[in-house]
């Protein structure tokens, strides 16, 4: 199964970097397996003290973390097609080092991470998992990034800022069908109609290439996707720019979190570790390295409010 995951993920990553061949090593993102710019830390005594004394780690002395390597700059295969790199692996390494452990990253398909975690094949998941009330019934969380969506436009667009519902009135917006972004934009449209404004027209395409072509040609005004994905595309292609962000839990917050088996006891020590990383600045520098500093948190929380059940 892992070989299948690898082939699919490598193909996805290759398609993302194919238009800029030098990007992997010479551009804004380092996708080399060596990762010379990665930071490291020493053990955090408070985090280690909070670890459950009898926690059954998959491998003694290691923190085994599941990641879905198909979404640069968060998780992706490096240029050797073997090593998983990105913002989330960097945070995972810092957490493991804070706990006095070695990190082992295991590739998992997105649909498989809950079973892999519950069956004890991995100790944790760091793979852009958002906190939801439904997931909190089965898992524990320690937050490490904001869950953000991004509004991006072509460089030539007259649209300068999108911060609230009125800013999308009358625009054509490409969005994924059935996504959280679509749900939120439909609510924004309802608010605009109530205020006597023209609703935005939501446009649906099946693949990224078609979406980008529509944005370049002016057939749509705005593209909405998870923020980090669009940051990568904008840095890669050079002709798109960000005009706003949107919380995944609008009108509330919904953050991304390290995920653990329910009542395993790992969430609290990991939150302590993350807060130590925030305090000494290594956390912020790590997110900056992957151009997702806008997703930084002021504090890691254990099991905060998440997206409600629908």
Image (tube, rainbow, N blue to C red):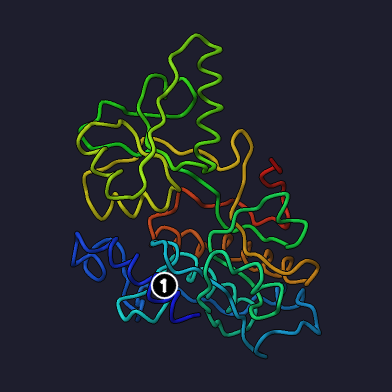
Rendered image quadrant of residue 245: top left
Residue at position x 29%, y 41% in the image:
241
Left or right: residue 176 versus residue 61 is left
Say what secondary structure mark 1 lies in.
strand
Total numbered labels = 1
- Up the image or down, 104 lies above or below 262; here it is below
Q: Quadrant of residue 86?
A: bottom left
Name the residue located 44 percent from the left edge and 43 percent from the top edge.
176
Residue 238 position, x and y percent, is 22, 49
Residue identified by numbered label 1 = 85
* Residue 67 point in image, percent of width and height: 52, 70
* Image point (64%, 74%), residue name: 116
Circle 1 residues within 10 Å: few <14, some 14–19, many ≥20: many
- 146 relative position to 216: left or right: right
Q: Between residues 296 and 264, which one lies in front from this camera angle?
A: 264
**114 versus 172 height, above or below:** below
287 or 117, which lies in front? Answer: 117
What residue is at 51 percent from the left and 14 percent from the top?
193
Q: Residue furthest top?
A: 196
Is 228 above or below relative to 282?
Answer: above
Q: Where does the image place residue 45, in percent across and percent down from the top left?
A: 70, 77
Quadrant for the C terminus, please: top right
**Residue 215 in which image quadrant:** top left
Q: Nearer the viewer, residue 181 or 240?
A: 181
Please state the horizontal and vertical placement of residue 163, each as a whole percent of the image.
46, 29
In the displayed orientation, state which residue is furthest to the bottom.
60
């Amino acid at each position: 199964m892992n070989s299948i995951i690898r082939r699919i993920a490598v193909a996805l990553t290759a398609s993302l970097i194919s238009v800029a061949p030098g990007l992997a090593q010479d551009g804004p993102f380092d996708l080399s397996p060596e990762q010379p710019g990665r930071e490291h830390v020493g053990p955090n005594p408070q985090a280690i003290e909070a670890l459950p004394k009898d926690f059954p780690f998959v491998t003694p002395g290691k923190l085994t973390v599941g990641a879905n390597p198909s979404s640069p700059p968060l998780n992706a295969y490096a240029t050797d097609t073997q090593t998983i790199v990105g913002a989330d692996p960097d945070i995972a390494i810092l957490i493991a080092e804070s706990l006095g452990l070695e990190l082992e990253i295991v590739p998992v398909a997105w649909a498989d991470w809950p079973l892999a975690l519950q069956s004890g094949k991995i100790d944790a998941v760091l793979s852009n998992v958002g906190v939801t009330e439904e997931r909190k019934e089965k898992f524990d969380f320690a937050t490490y990034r904001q869950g953000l969506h991004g509004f991006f436009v072509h460089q030539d667009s007259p649209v300068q800022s999108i911060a609230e519902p009125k800013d999308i009135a009358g625009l054509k917006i490409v969005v994924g069908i059935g996504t959280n972004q679509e749900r939120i934009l439909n609510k924004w449209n309802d608010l605009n109609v109530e205020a006597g404004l023209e609703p935005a027209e939501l446009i649906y395409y099946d693949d990224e290439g078609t979406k980008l072509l529509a944005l370049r040609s002016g057939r749509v005004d705005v593209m909405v996707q998870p923020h980090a994905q669009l940051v990568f595309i904008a840095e890669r292609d050079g002709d798109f720019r960000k005009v706003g962000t949107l919380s995944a839990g609008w009108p509330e917050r919904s953050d991304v979190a390290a995920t653990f088996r329910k009542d395993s006891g790992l969430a609290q020590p990991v939150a302590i570790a993350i807060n130590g990383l925030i305090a000494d600045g290594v956390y912020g520098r790590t997110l900056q390295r992957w151009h997702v500093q806008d997703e930084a948190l002021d504090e890691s929380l254990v099991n905060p409010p998440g997206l409600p059940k629908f």
